[in-house]
Image (cartoon, rainbow, N blue to C red):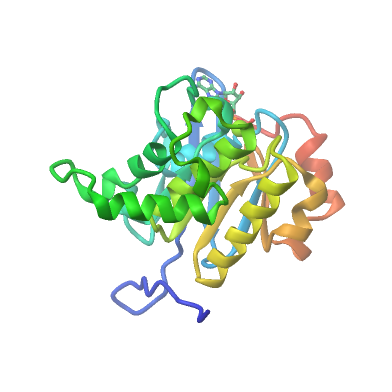
Amino acid sequence: MMEQKSNHTNLDGVHLPPIEIKNLSVTYRTEPALWNIDLSFPEGKLIAIVGPNGAGKSTLIKAVMGLVPITAGKVSIYGKQYSKQRNKVAYVPQRGSVDWDFPTDALDVVEMGLYGKLGWLRRPNSQTREKARDCLTKVGLGDYADRQIGQLSGGQQQRVFVARALAQDPQIYLMDEPLNGVDAVTEETILSILEDLRKEGKTIVMVHHDLQTVDKYFDWVVMLNRSLISAGPIKEVFTKENLDIAYQEKQRVSLQ
Ligand code: ADP
Ligand code: MG
Protein backbone atom coordinates (compact mmCIF):
# COMPACT_ATOMS: atom_id res chain seq x y z
CA MET A 1 0.00 0.00 0.00
CA MET A 2 1.16 3.54 -0.70
CA GLU A 3 2.30 5.51 2.28
CA GLN A 4 -0.15 8.28 3.00
CA LYS A 5 1.17 11.39 4.62
CA SER A 6 -1.43 13.09 6.72
CA ASN A 7 -0.81 16.46 5.10
CA HIS A 8 -1.00 18.42 8.34
CA THR A 9 1.02 21.57 7.81
CA ASN A 10 0.95 25.03 9.28
CA LEU A 11 0.49 28.20 7.22
CA ASP A 12 4.16 28.14 6.22
CA GLY A 13 3.87 24.59 4.93
CA VAL A 14 5.85 23.17 7.83
CA HIS A 15 4.84 19.64 8.71
CA LEU A 16 3.12 19.47 12.10
CA PRO A 17 3.91 16.60 14.46
CA PRO A 18 1.00 14.30 15.37
CA ILE A 19 1.59 14.95 19.06
CA GLU A 20 3.62 17.72 20.61
CA ILE A 21 4.06 18.01 24.37
CA LYS A 22 5.56 21.12 25.91
CA ASN A 23 6.67 21.50 29.54
CA LEU A 24 3.97 19.10 30.68
CA SER A 25 3.53 18.41 34.38
CA VAL A 26 0.72 16.44 36.00
CA THR A 27 0.16 16.26 39.75
CA TYR A 28 -2.68 14.18 41.12
CA ARG A 29 -2.30 15.04 44.78
CA THR A 30 0.95 16.44 46.06
CA GLU A 31 3.68 14.62 44.17
CA PRO A 32 4.06 15.09 40.43
CA ALA A 33 3.30 12.01 38.30
CA LEU A 34 4.88 13.73 35.31
CA TRP A 35 7.45 16.45 35.50
CA ASN A 36 8.29 18.94 32.78
CA ILE A 37 7.98 16.68 29.76
CA ASP A 38 9.02 18.01 26.36
CA LEU A 39 8.35 15.63 23.55
CA SER A 40 7.44 15.67 19.89
CA PHE A 41 6.29 12.38 18.39
CA PRO A 42 7.21 11.55 14.80
CA GLU A 43 4.52 10.66 12.29
CA GLY A 44 4.01 7.19 10.85
CA LYS A 45 6.01 5.35 13.48
CA LEU A 46 5.38 2.62 16.00
CA ILE A 47 6.38 4.22 19.29
CA ALA A 48 6.82 2.48 22.65
CA ILE A 49 6.51 4.20 26.01
CA VAL A 50 8.54 2.33 28.63
CA GLY A 51 9.39 2.90 32.27
CA PRO A 52 8.88 1.23 35.66
CA ASN A 53 5.53 0.93 37.43
CA GLY A 54 4.27 4.30 38.49
CA ALA A 55 6.53 6.10 35.98
CA GLY A 56 3.58 8.03 34.59
CA LYS A 57 3.15 6.11 31.33
CA SER A 58 -0.64 5.85 31.55
CA THR A 59 -0.77 9.42 32.82
CA LEU A 60 1.13 10.62 29.75
CA ILE A 61 -1.34 8.97 27.39
CA LYS A 62 -4.29 10.31 29.35
CA ALA A 63 -2.80 13.80 29.45
CA VAL A 64 -2.66 13.82 25.65
CA MET A 65 -6.45 13.38 25.62
CA GLY A 66 -7.09 15.75 28.50
CA LEU A 67 -8.33 12.91 30.71
CA VAL A 68 -6.18 14.05 33.65
CA PRO A 69 -5.77 17.59 34.97
CA ILE A 70 -2.66 19.19 33.52
CA THR A 71 -0.77 21.20 36.15
CA ALA A 72 1.45 22.97 33.64
CA GLY A 73 2.32 22.81 29.97
CA LYS A 74 0.52 22.08 26.76
CA VAL A 75 -0.31 19.27 24.39
CA SER A 76 -1.13 19.72 20.72
CA ILE A 77 -2.38 17.29 18.12
CA TYR A 78 -1.26 18.37 14.66
CA GLY A 79 -0.84 21.87 16.03
CA LYS A 80 -4.25 22.20 17.67
CA GLN A 81 -5.71 21.38 21.03
CA TYR A 82 -7.07 17.88 21.48
CA SER A 83 -10.68 18.99 21.80
CA LYS A 84 -10.54 20.15 18.17
CA GLN A 85 -8.82 16.98 16.99
CA ARG A 86 -10.73 14.27 18.82
CA ASN A 87 -11.67 12.40 15.70
CA LYS A 88 -8.01 11.99 14.74
CA VAL A 89 -7.21 10.04 17.90
CA ALA A 90 -8.34 6.62 19.14
CA TYR A 91 -7.58 5.24 22.57
CA VAL A 92 -7.24 1.65 23.73
CA PRO A 93 -7.36 1.78 27.55
CA GLN A 94 -5.49 -0.54 29.86
CA ARG A 95 -7.60 -3.70 30.16
CA GLY A 96 -7.78 -3.64 33.95
CA SER A 97 -9.44 -0.23 33.83
CA VAL A 98 -12.55 -1.47 32.02
CA ASP A 99 -15.70 -2.88 33.65
CA TRP A 100 -16.20 -6.18 31.85
CA ASP A 101 -19.49 -6.92 33.63
CA PHE A 102 -21.11 -4.22 31.57
CA PRO A 103 -23.88 -6.06 29.71
CA THR A 104 -22.98 -5.51 26.09
CA ASP A 105 -21.74 -7.66 23.23
CA ALA A 106 -18.53 -7.36 21.22
CA LEU A 107 -20.22 -5.69 18.25
CA ASP A 108 -21.76 -3.01 20.47
CA VAL A 109 -18.40 -2.18 22.01
CA VAL A 110 -16.91 -1.63 18.56
CA GLU A 111 -19.90 0.31 17.32
CA MET A 112 -19.89 2.58 20.34
CA GLY A 113 -16.47 3.74 19.22
CA LEU A 114 -18.20 5.25 16.19
CA TYR A 115 -20.75 7.35 18.06
CA GLY A 116 -18.35 10.24 18.48
CA LYS A 117 -17.92 10.40 14.73
CA LEU A 118 -21.64 10.31 14.03
CA GLY A 119 -22.52 13.09 16.40
CA TRP A 120 -25.13 12.77 19.08
CA LEU A 121 -28.16 13.24 16.86
CA ARG A 122 -27.36 10.47 14.44
CA ARG A 123 -28.13 6.94 15.45
CA PRO A 124 -26.06 3.93 14.53
CA ASN A 125 -27.32 2.39 11.30
CA SER A 126 -26.64 -0.57 9.05
CA GLN A 127 -23.51 1.15 7.76
CA THR A 128 -21.96 1.52 11.20
CA ARG A 129 -22.95 -2.07 12.02
CA GLU A 130 -21.18 -3.27 8.91
CA LYS A 131 -18.09 -1.20 9.65
CA ALA A 132 -18.00 -2.57 13.20
CA ARG A 133 -18.36 -6.12 11.87
CA ASP A 134 -15.50 -5.61 9.40
CA CYS A 135 -13.25 -4.40 12.20
CA LEU A 136 -14.13 -7.39 14.39
CA THR A 137 -13.24 -9.63 11.45
CA LYS A 138 -9.89 -7.84 11.05
CA VAL A 139 -8.96 -8.76 14.61
CA GLY A 140 -10.06 -12.36 14.07
CA LEU A 141 -13.33 -12.10 16.00
CA GLY A 142 -15.86 -12.14 13.18
CA ASP A 143 -17.64 -15.06 14.83
CA TYR A 144 -17.85 -13.39 18.24
CA ALA A 145 -19.96 -10.35 17.41
CA ASP A 146 -22.85 -11.43 19.65
CA ARG A 147 -20.72 -12.61 22.57
CA GLN A 148 -21.02 -10.68 25.83
CA ILE A 149 -17.67 -8.98 26.42
CA GLY A 150 -17.46 -10.42 29.93
CA GLN A 151 -17.48 -13.89 28.37
CA LEU A 152 -14.49 -13.33 26.12
CA SER A 153 -10.93 -14.26 27.05
CA GLY A 154 -8.55 -11.48 28.07
CA GLY A 155 -6.87 -11.56 24.68
CA GLN A 156 -10.20 -11.46 22.86
CA GLN A 157 -11.35 -8.51 24.95
CA GLN A 158 -8.17 -6.70 24.05
CA ARG A 159 -8.79 -7.39 20.37
CA VAL A 160 -12.34 -6.03 20.66
CA PHE A 161 -10.87 -2.76 21.88
CA VAL A 162 -8.38 -2.72 19.03
CA ALA A 163 -11.30 -3.27 16.63
CA ARG A 164 -13.11 -0.36 18.27
CA ALA A 165 -10.11 1.90 17.66
CA LEU A 166 -9.81 0.70 14.04
CA ALA A 167 -13.48 1.50 13.43
CA GLN A 168 -12.80 5.12 14.35
CA ASP A 169 -10.23 5.31 11.55
CA PRO A 170 -7.95 7.76 13.37
CA GLN A 171 -4.52 9.13 12.40
CA ILE A 172 -3.16 8.47 15.88
CA TYR A 173 -3.57 5.39 18.07
CA LEU A 174 -2.91 5.66 21.80
CA MET A 175 -2.73 2.23 23.41
CA ASP A 176 -2.08 1.39 27.03
CA GLU A 177 -0.32 -1.97 27.32
CA PRO A 178 -2.48 -3.80 24.75
CA LEU A 179 -0.04 -6.74 24.73
CA ASN A 180 0.09 -7.17 28.49
CA GLY A 181 -0.98 -10.68 29.50
CA VAL A 182 -2.47 -11.62 26.13
CA ASP A 183 -2.10 -14.95 24.33
CA ALA A 184 0.30 -15.45 21.41
CA VAL A 185 -2.46 -15.30 18.77
CA THR A 186 -3.63 -11.94 20.10
CA GLU A 187 -0.10 -10.55 20.22
CA GLU A 188 0.54 -11.58 16.60
CA THR A 189 -2.83 -10.31 15.43
CA ILE A 190 -2.38 -6.91 17.06
CA LEU A 191 1.18 -6.53 15.81
CA SER A 192 0.33 -7.35 12.24
CA ILE A 193 -2.54 -4.84 12.34
CA LEU A 194 -0.21 -2.19 13.74
CA GLU A 195 2.33 -2.85 11.02
CA ASP A 196 -0.37 -2.36 8.38
CA LEU A 197 -1.41 0.89 10.06
CA ARG A 198 2.17 2.11 10.08
CA LYS A 199 2.40 1.39 6.33
CA GLU A 200 -0.65 3.62 5.93
CA GLY A 201 1.23 6.39 7.72
CA LYS A 202 -0.62 6.18 11.03
CA THR A 203 1.15 7.03 14.26
CA ILE A 204 0.93 4.43 17.02
CA VAL A 205 1.94 5.25 20.58
CA MET A 206 1.87 2.25 22.88
CA VAL A 207 2.75 1.73 26.51
CA HIS A 208 4.80 -1.45 26.48
CA HIS A 209 5.87 -3.61 29.37
CA ASP A 210 8.21 -6.12 27.79
CA LEU A 211 11.67 -4.63 27.35
CA GLN A 212 12.81 -7.76 25.46
CA THR A 213 10.65 -6.96 22.44
CA VAL A 214 11.09 -3.18 22.23
CA ASP A 215 13.76 -3.26 19.52
CA LYS A 216 11.95 -5.98 17.59
CA TYR A 217 8.53 -4.32 17.44
CA PHE A 218 9.08 -0.58 17.58
CA ASP A 219 10.76 2.22 15.61
CA TRP A 220 10.98 4.72 18.38
CA VAL A 221 10.95 4.69 22.17
CA VAL A 222 10.07 7.10 24.97
CA MET A 223 11.81 6.25 28.25
CA LEU A 224 9.99 7.72 31.17
CA ASN A 225 10.33 7.90 34.91
CA ARG A 226 8.19 10.87 35.89
CA SER A 227 10.57 13.03 33.94
CA LEU A 228 11.64 12.17 30.42
CA ILE A 229 14.80 10.07 30.40
CA SER A 230 15.16 9.88 26.65
CA ALA A 231 13.13 9.70 23.45
CA GLY A 232 14.13 8.86 19.90
CA PRO A 233 14.87 6.09 17.42
CA ILE A 234 15.46 2.75 19.16
CA LYS A 235 19.06 2.47 17.97
CA GLU A 236 19.99 5.83 19.42
CA VAL A 237 18.21 5.89 22.74
CA PHE A 238 17.35 2.34 23.80
CA THR A 239 20.72 1.89 25.51
CA LYS A 240 21.81 0.22 28.71
CA GLU A 241 22.75 3.59 30.15
CA ASN A 242 19.27 4.99 29.60
CA LEU A 243 17.60 1.81 30.86
CA ASP A 244 19.68 2.01 34.03
CA ILE A 245 18.60 5.57 34.59
CA ALA A 246 14.93 4.85 33.87
CA TYR A 247 14.66 1.67 35.91
CA GLN A 248 17.21 1.90 38.69
CA GLU A 249 17.71 5.42 39.72
CA LYS A 250 15.26 6.78 42.25
CA GLN A 251 12.53 9.00 40.88
CA ARG A 252 14.35 11.72 39.06
CA VAL A 253 12.24 14.58 40.16
CA SER A 254 13.68 17.75 41.44
CA LEU A 255 11.19 20.27 42.63
CA GLN A 256 13.12 23.47 42.59
P1 ADP B 1 2.33 3.85 34.99
O1 ADP B 1 1.27 3.75 33.96
O2 ADP B 1 3.67 4.21 34.44
O3 ADP B 1 2.43 2.63 35.86
P2 ADP B 1 0.58 5.88 36.14
O4 ADP B 1 0.55 6.95 35.12
O5 ADP B 1 -0.56 4.96 36.20
O6 ADP B 1 1.96 5.05 35.97
O7 ADP B 1 0.76 6.51 37.58
C1 ADP B 1 1.79 7.43 37.88
C2 ADP B 1 1.67 7.84 39.33
O8 ADP B 1 0.48 8.59 39.54
C3 ADP B 1 1.60 6.66 40.29
O9 ADP B 1 2.29 7.01 41.46
C4 ADP B 1 0.12 6.52 40.56
O10 ADP B 1 -0.12 5.98 41.82
C5 ADP B 1 -0.36 7.96 40.48
N1 ADP B 1 -1.76 8.04 39.99
C6 ADP B 1 -2.20 7.58 38.80
N2 ADP B 1 -3.52 7.85 38.63
C7 ADP B 1 -3.91 8.51 39.75
C8 ADP B 1 -5.15 9.09 40.19
N3 ADP B 1 -6.25 9.04 39.43
N4 ADP B 1 -5.16 9.69 41.40
C9 ADP B 1 -4.06 9.77 42.17
N5 ADP B 1 -2.86 9.26 41.82
C10 ADP B 1 -2.77 8.64 40.62
MG1 MG C 1 -0.04 2.25 33.40
Is residue 20 something that shows in the picture? no
Residue drawn 79% across and 37% down? 247
Identify the image quadrant of the C terminus: top right
From the viewer's perspective, is 254 left or right of 145?
right
- Residue 204, position in %: x, y? 55, 56
Report the front residue among 85 and 141: 141
Residue drawn 44% across and 75% down? 5
Question: Which quadrant does ligand 2 occupy?
Answer: top right
- Numbered marks: total: 0
Report the front residue among 83 and 245: 83
Is residue 201 something that shows in the picture? yes
- Residue 171, position in %: x, y? 42, 61
Report the front residue among 94 and 16: 94
Residue drawn 34% across and 54% down? 130
Residue drawn 57% across and 31% down? 152
The image shows residue 216, relative to residue 147, as above or below, that is below
- Residue 37, position in %: x, y? 55, 45
The image shows residue 110, relative to residue 233, as above or below, that is above
